[in-house]
Image: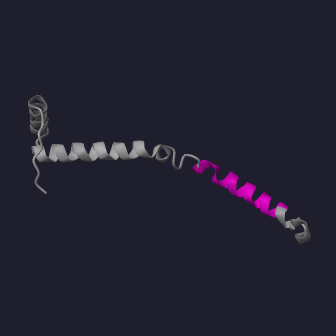
Amino acid sequence: MKTTLEIPDALFRQAKSAAAEQGIPLRALVSDALSEKLRVRGRRDKPWLKTFGKLRSLHKETAHIGRIVEEEFGRIDPEDWQ
């Protein structure tokens, strides 16, 4: 999609120079920069994603505790549940 953006002259010159140094078109630099900004912003909106999966090492311990709980609940008489 084509669009028109107003970019301050100094920022435009920096972007044009950076694109030339990387050997890519300005549109690719702008697209990459925008994608990165949105990706980082998405993580900021969901801070819990940074730690997602870090407790994976506790999987065996959690399963063990679950088995103990199930075992203990199996010992309760059904009439005690009421």
The x, y position of residue 48, in whole percent, is 50, 45
Question: Is residue 41 visible to the viewer in this orientation of the structure?
Answer: yes
58 magenta-colored:
yes
Residue in view at x 78 percent, y 63 percent: 70
Q: How many marks?
A: 0
Image: 70 above or below 10: below
Residue at 86% x, 66% y is: 81
Query: Residue pushed farthest top?
Result: 10
> Percent x, y for residue 19?
12, 39
Left or right: residue 82 versus residue 28 is right
Q: Which residues are magenta?
A: 56-72
Q: Position of residue 4 (x, y in %)?
A: 9, 47
Check residue 65 for magenta coloring: yes
Q: Left or right: 31 with respect to 40? A: left
**Residue at point 17%, 44% (across, down):** 30
Q: How is the image coloured?
A: one colour
Looking at the image, the residue that sits furthest to the bottom is 78
Q: In the image, is 39 to the left or to the right of 54?
A: left
